[in-house]
Amino acid sequence: MSTIEEEILNYIDGNCSLAEKTIIETKIARDKEYNLLYQSLLVVSQQLIELEFEEPSMSFTRNVMDKVNLELKPVAMQTKINHKIIYGIGALFICAILFILGYAIAISNLNKNFSMPKLNFSFAIHKYINPTSLKIFLFLDLVLALIYLDALLRKGTFKKT
């Protein structure tokens, strides 16, 4: 829509200021093309005012919703598990474990001189509580906590609300 049409429609609807109104009136009076456009838009505006709008029936919404409910519901997509991928990932982990185990055996010092450890019943706590034993203790606690969390999740205790 051009600016001339916008100006005239704003003039017809009464959406322009007093200064714009006087400018548009002078343009309508002086310019023949402007006047013809004004007359045609005035006729269209009058026809739109006289137009009666039809209202839908009271049961329109219910009828539409009934037709929507008759439509087939989309079937939920079922994902197909590709067992080859799962076996491939499992094989990758097994190979990694075997590689680490083989590397640990290769760099270890295997001498055949084994002797039974001597038992010392002195209870010096500083010998038993060291960083390695604390790490082992915390690792076992973590494993037990994960097992407990798995059991809770399998029971369905933590359900989404």
Image (cartoon, rainbow, N blue to C red):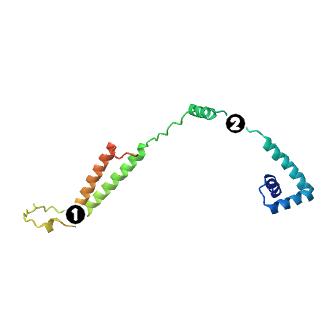
Q: Secondary structure at mark 2?
A: loop
Density class for disc 1 (Cα within 10 Å; few <14, some 14-19, many ≥20) is: few
Callout 2 amino acid: Glu
Furthest toward the front, the residue is 18
Q: Nearer the viewer, residue 120 or 29?
A: 29
Residue 151 coordinates in the image, percent (x, y): 29, 46
> Residue at (25%, 56%) from the top-left corner?
141
Residue 70 coordinates in the image, percent (x, y): 57, 31
Q: Which residue is mark 1?
A: 134
In the picture, measured across the screen, residue 130 lies left or right of residue 10, that is left
Q: Which mark is residue 35?
A: none
In the picture, measured across the screen, residue 117 lies left or right of residue 84, that is left
The tag earlier along the polypeptide, 1 or 2, is 2
> Residue at (36%, 49%) from the top-left corner?
90
Q: How many marks?
A: 2
Q: Nearer the viewer, residue 118 or 73?
A: 73
Q: Nearer the viewer, residue 64 or 135?
A: 64
Position of residue 81 relative to residue 146, above or below, is above
Residue 78 coordinates in the image, percent (x, y): 47, 39
When asked about the image quadrant of residue 101, the answer is bottom left
In the picture, measured across the screen, residue 5 lies left or right of residue 89, that is right
> Residue at (27%, 61%) from the top-left corner?
104
Callout 1 amino acid: Leu
Position of residue 139 relative to residue 130, above or below, is above
Quarter of the image with the N terminus in it: bottom right
Q: Secondary structure at mark 1?
A: helix
Q: Which mark is residue 55?
A: 2
Q: Nearer the viewer, residue 112 or 120?
A: 120
Q: How much space separates mark 1 and mark 2, taking CA atoms?
A: 79 Å
Position of residue 59 relative to residue 120, above or below, is above
> Residue at (42%, 47%) from the top-left corner?
85
